């Protein structure tokens, strides 16, 4: 959601116009939920009501942990600041809480159409295993990511975005 609010995406007015009204309305609702005012209060309240599994918004969690670490001294009068440690533990607990619970059903495919199950049975386990091993190879992974070029300069990203839009 936060990526859709980026200026490069929000400037795609013709693309936004092509979205169905229902989708734009849903986006507006989600955008209000992710409003950064009051330290993302609406988002935090919504997440507190959810039950796992869920994926927390990591930049917000990292921001919280950074402020906890930098805003509180580790030692107070040569004693360990346990309040700081409690706050850090609470942030780490949130990540732990977001993990999947063992009570979840093991087979999500039961609700899928029958043809998907038949297709899955047709694939040999050995083929899947061979493909899995070949993709896990460090050399294959390195060969795949070696030629990739990461652009982390905001000005260049905006220029490329504008070039794509014109």
Image (tube, grey):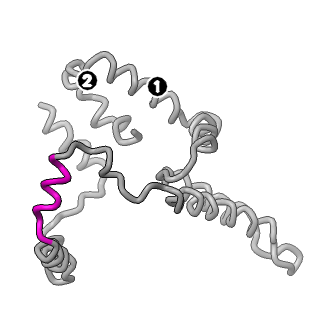
Residue 2 in view here: yes
Label 2–label 1 contact, CB within 8 A: no
What is the span of residues highlighted in magenta in the rendered image? 115-124
Kindly identify the residue that appears in the image at 56 percent across and 60 percent down: 95
Image location of residue 137, percent across then percent down = 19, 82
Residue at label 2?
16
Residue 116 magenta-highlighted? yes
Q: Earlier in the sequence, mark 2 or mark 1?
A: 2
Percent across and percent down for residue 48 are 63, 44
| Percent of width and height locating residue 94 | 61, 57
Frontmost residue, 55 versus 163: 55
Type of secondary structure dominating the magenta stretch: helix
**Could you tell me which secondary element the residue under label 1 belongs to?**
helix
Marks 2, 1: nearer the viewer = 1
Residue 92, compared with residue 43, is above or below; it is below
151 in magenta: no
Which residue is found at the position 75% from the left and 65% from the top? 86
Residue 146: tell me if it is visible.
Answer: no
The answer to which quarter of the image holds residue 89 is bottom right
Label 1 belongs to which residue? 29
- Seen in the picture, residue 98 relative to 129 is either above or below; the reply is above
- Single out the residue that lies furthest toward the top: 21
């Amino acid at each position: 959601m936060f990526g859709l609010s980026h200026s490069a995406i929000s400037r795609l007015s013709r693309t936004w116009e092509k979205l169905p009204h229902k989708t734009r309305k849903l986006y507006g609702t989600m955008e209000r939920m992710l409003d950064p005012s009051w330290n993302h209060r609406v988002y935090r309240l919504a997440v507190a009501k959810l039950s796992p599994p869920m994926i927390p918004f990591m930049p917000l969690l990292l921001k919280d942990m950074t402020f906890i670490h930098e805003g509180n001294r580790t030692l107070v009068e040569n004693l360990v600041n346990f309040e700081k440690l409690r706050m850090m533990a609470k942030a780490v607990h949130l990540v732990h809480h977001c993990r999947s619970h063992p009570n979840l059903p093991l087979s999500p495919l039961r609700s899928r159409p029958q043809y998907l199950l038949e297709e899955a049975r047709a694939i040999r386990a050995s083929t899947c295993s061979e493909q899995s091993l070949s993709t896990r190879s460090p050399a294959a992974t390195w060969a795949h990511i070696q030629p990739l070029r990461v652009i982390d300069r905001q000005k260049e990203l905006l220029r490329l975005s504008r070039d794509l839009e014109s």
